[in-house]
Amino acid sequence: MISSQETSSSTQPSADLAERFLAAVILGAVGDAIGYRNGSWEFNTDGESIHYELKKYYGSLAGIDVKGWRVSDDTVMHLASLRALNTFMKHQQQQQLTLHNPKLIYSFDEKDPNSCQEFMKQFVDPLMQEMSKEYIICWDDMGGRAPGPTCGKGVRFLESKGVDKWQLYPYDSRGGGCGGSMRAMMIGALYGPQRRDMLIAASVESGRLTHNHPNGFLGALVSALFTAYALEKTIPPAQWGVMFLYDIMPRTKIYLEKVAMRDWQVMESEITKFEQKFAQYLKERSLYLDEQVVKLALSAQHKSPETLSNEEKHALQQVTYLQPQFPKEYGIQERDDFYRKWSFSGWAGASGDDSCIIAYDSILFAGPNNYEVMMLHSALHAGDSDSTGTIAAAWYGAMYGFNNVFKKNWENIEKKQEMTDLAASLYELYKL
């Protein structure tokens, strides 16, 4: 339920799942449009001047009416991802009406080659062909949207080789940008523990269509995974990082080595670098735990409390009580400096890893239902602000719906009707 007040809020204690699907899609576009500001804020490398312009021309974030603010390539490609998910599921349902698998939940057994092949054949290949088609089509809508050159190179490859050859896109040592993460958020529509294999494969391979490098496609995985966590509302944001490292990454590496079987040897060291950088961020925010502790806590969750050992109880407590720690002074310049140190070449948020780190940092600092602070931190800084803004705002919408969102920020957003229709369709197709 969406109110007509200056800020939107649900009448229920928390937004329902259908609203959160919608908010994730629309607010992703809002984070993009405001971070982009028709190019003038995305490419402004001085965070202080961005916030000065915000105050001078709009008073505050609440004063921004996004009418006339174009979404960038981020949203155009995100919607292409969603159209592919939508078409794929509709087609699969039509083809398999007689099967006893109405939700079409796929998984793989890495010890069974036939299972791995069927997973690729029934799920990954048809979805990636559909996604390739949509990425090619959306490229006609890139005028004035500052599309990235790496995305363009990948799209041209798909167009020239054919969408059925998507797996032939070569490993790219320079493919670590944020083009995968900026368009993967609502691949998190594949939510639920029973769909983890699907989410891993869909997000990873969607990224590899243009960014066949671990820094690129693992950014897509984090982008989608944290959306799924937000929709599920069973894991608090403070725990997302360690769950990604120790619950999801082991399965992801199995998928890459045993199921996808592309470029594993050449990229193994780069995967480790991604994990190490993410772990370092968690350490700086006091959110890091050893792998053994997290795995012990995960196993303890499935046991009755009276059967837990002292070690298991302690592990559960350590995970449960994780809380981010921030410096006392964390203003505009401090954030720009902190964001920049995670970057590949000085432009914060332009890579797969740091785009997600900055978005995550913004969600953690803002806390529950604090839309304004989340946006000020994620979409208004000296780096690739539309990409970090779109990721963080989508996660916010997936968790909190439109709670405390300024209506002027989203009611006139470009492509709103398409986003509304897509979100409703995805909700009906993928709800569990």
Image (cartoon, grey):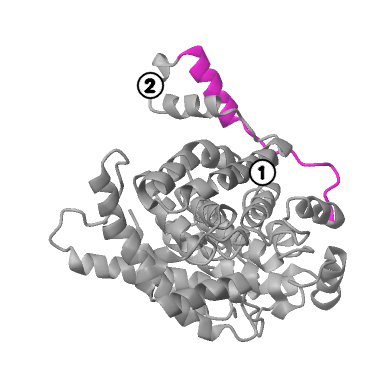
Label 1 or label 2, whichever comes before in sequence order: 1
Report if residue 247 is visible in the image: yes
Residue type indicated by callout 2? Ser
Residue type indicated by callout 1? Lys
User: Which sits in the foreground, 385 or 326?
Assistant: 385
Report if residue 75 is visible in the image: no
Q: Are marks 1 and 2 in contact (CB under 8 Å)?
A: no
Residue drawn at point x = 63 percent, y = 33 percent: 322
Q: Which mark is residue 304?
A: 2
Q: Residues within 10 Å of mark 2 (few under 14, many from 20)?
A: few
Residue drawn at point x = 59 percent, y = 27 percent: 290
User: Which sits in the foreground, 229 or 161?
Assistant: 161
Residue 427 image point, x, y percent? 38, 63
| Circle 1 residue | 277
User: Which sits in the foreground, 233 or 108?
Assistant: 108
Q: In which quarter of the view is residue 349 placed?
A: bottom right
Of circles 1 and 2, which is in front?
A: 1
Residue drawn at point x = 82 percent, y = 67 percent: 45
Where 349 falls versus 142 (above or below)?
above
Residue 346 image point, x, y percent? 78, 59
Residue 242 image point, x, y percent? 57, 37
Per the image, label 1 sits on a secondary structure element best described as helix
Residue drawn at point x = 71 percent, y = 39 percent: 285
Q: How far apart are marks 1 and 2 (CA)?
A: 35 Å
Per the image, label 2 sits on a secondary structure element best described as loop
Residue 133 horizontal side relative to residue 118, left or right: right
Q: In which quarter of the view is residue 102 placed?
A: bottom left
Tell me where the magenta segment starts and ends, as one range. Answer: 309-331
